[in-house]
Image: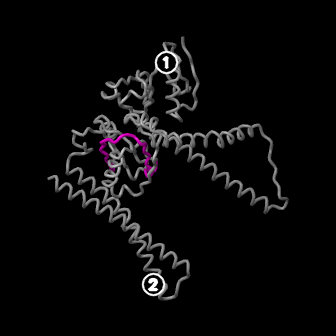
């Protein structure tokens, strides 16, 4: 017996679609095929089962680590994969990577957002021109010729002001959800949060200027019994639940470019992705790995040369960004002082001069923190060698 379901916006909210497939399987309806053009899912009747689904958008085949953990490909078309695991979610230790879906949905979101902004701008210009014509014309009115094509025009406008913004907003929420919530179930965080019911939120600004201190802070929180469950999309809000003290090694990794297998390599090595930045300029990722008392704390990179190269990249990047800005603001201050000595400046210019000075101090502290981070890593590597 076959069942057909129409889901036009299934790719807008991947998590919701996965949960829906799981609920269908619990009713005995198991997905077997998906028509990505007509947006239809096809199900076969079988025995009810407590299974887990994940949808992937990748060119690569399933890794051996995922297949060993029970994942199998039940549908594949182009880059779309529907993966099934015969175990309930709390019993699964490894999950497919979300990077492909996040990247795809970001592109589609930007396209819809660009279309909407373009038409919004043209509509504002149209109103401005129409208003100007009405004000300047003698009669103060204009005639609209009747035409059957107005139906098409009105339908297109309704579509533009409903479907396009809806798609952009829905995709934005989906990208945010997938980015903020990596598979924390790999880390037994779901059971911890349910049982504890005690969530602590900490704000951490500027950790990317001294990531070694972030590592120490997160590891101390774990030792104090506060288990990290989520990091916000902006990377400044850290959510913990009161659980049991654990030995967890954290690493904040910065990459100028990322290999397409970057996430898969570290996940297969047992690392859990807790955060990844959405910016193309700053590619940060925070990884976590639990270990026993009898074990040495695991390191994301054991090569001392790579560790020093990583610290150098962080420092050089921040110096390259903020040093020119510091020089620019110093030049503006010098210019304002020169104007004050020659012809005088107003109160607003003096206020701007003070503000420029504060910005210089702030940017200078950022450069100093980055430089001290490189110095600490250099001393650490020298101590290891």
**Whether residue 183 can be seen here:** no
Q: Which residue appears at 46% of the width and 21% of the height?
A: 50
Query: Is residue 202 one of those drawn in magenta?
Result: no
Q: Position of residue 359 (x, y in %)?
A: 44, 69
Which region shows up in magenta? 233-256
Identify the image quadrant of residue 54: top left
Along the line of sight, the residue nearer the viewer: 322 or 178: 178
Residue lying furthest top: 1
Q: Residues within 10 Å of mark 1 (few under 14, many from 20)?
A: many
Q: Secondary structure at mark 1?
A: strand
Residue occupied by mark 1: 30
Whole-percent x and y of residue 315?
31, 59
Q: Position of residue 340 (x, y in %)?
A: 49, 85
Q: Is residue 135 above or below residue 292?
A: below
Query: Residue 205's x, y, as percent?
Result: 42, 57
- Identify the image quadrant of the N terminus: top right
- Residue drawn where x is 47% and y is 18% of the image: 49
Q: Nearer the viewer, mark 2 or mark 1?
A: 1
Is residue 246 highlighted in magenta?
yes
Q: Are marks 2 and 1 in contact (CB under 8 Å)?
A: no
Mark earlier in primary sequence (2, 1): 1
Question: 311 above or below 29?
Answer: below
- Between 26 and 324, the residue placed more toward the observer is 26
The residues bearing labels 2 and 1 have C-alpha atoms spaced at a distance of 76 Å
Residue hosting label 2 = 338
Q: Is residue 283 above or below residue 136?
A: above
């Amino acid at each position: 017996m076959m069942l057909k379901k129409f889901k036009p916006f299934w790719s807008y909210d991947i998590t919701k679609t996965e949960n829906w497939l799981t609920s269908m399987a619990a009713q005995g309806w198991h997905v077997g095929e998906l028509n990505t053009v007509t947006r239809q899912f096809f199900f076969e009747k079988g025995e009810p089962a407590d299974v887990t689904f994940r949808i992937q958008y990748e060119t690569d085949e399933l890794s051996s680590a995922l297949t060993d953990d029970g994942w199998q490909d039940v549908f594949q078309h182009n880059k779309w994969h529907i993966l099934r695991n015969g175990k309930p979610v709390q019993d699964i230790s490894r999950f497919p990577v979300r990077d492909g879906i996040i990247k795809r949905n970001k592109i589609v979101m930007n396209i819809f957002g660009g279309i909407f902004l373009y038409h919004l701008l043209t509509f504002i210009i149209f109103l401005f021109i129409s208003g100007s014509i009405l004000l300047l014309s003698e009669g103060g009115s204009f005639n609209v010729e009747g035409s059957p094509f107005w139906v098409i025009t009105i339908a297109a406008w309704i579509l533009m002001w409903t479907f396009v913004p809806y798609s952009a907003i829905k995709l934005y929420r989906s990208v945010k959800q997938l980015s903020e919530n990596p598979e924390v179930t790999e880390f037994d965080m779901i059971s911890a949060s349910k049982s504890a019911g005690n969530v602590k939120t900490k704000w951490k600004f500027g950790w990317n200027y001294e990531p070694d201190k972030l590592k120490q802070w997160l590891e101390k929180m774990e030792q104090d019994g506060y288990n990290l469950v989520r990091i916000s999309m902006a990377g400044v809000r850290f959510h913990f639940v009161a659980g049991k003290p654990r030995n967890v090694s954290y690493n904040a990794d910065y990459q100028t470019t990322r290999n397409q297998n970057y996430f898969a390599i570290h996940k297969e090595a047992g690392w859990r992705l807790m955060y990844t930045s959405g910016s193309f300029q700053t590619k940060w990722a925070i990884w976590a790995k639990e270990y026993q008392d009898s074990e040495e704390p695991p390191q994301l990179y054991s090569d001392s040369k790579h560790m020093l190269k990583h610290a150098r990249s962080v420092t050089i990047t921040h110096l390259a960004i903020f040093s020119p800005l510091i020089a620019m603001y110093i030049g503006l201050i010098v210019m304002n002082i020169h104007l004050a000595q020659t012809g005088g400046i107003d109160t607003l210019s003096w206020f701007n001069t003070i503000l420029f000075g504060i910005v210089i101090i702030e940017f200078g502290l950022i450069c100093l923190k980055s430089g001290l981070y490189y110095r600490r890593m250099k001393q650490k590597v020298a101590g290891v060698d």
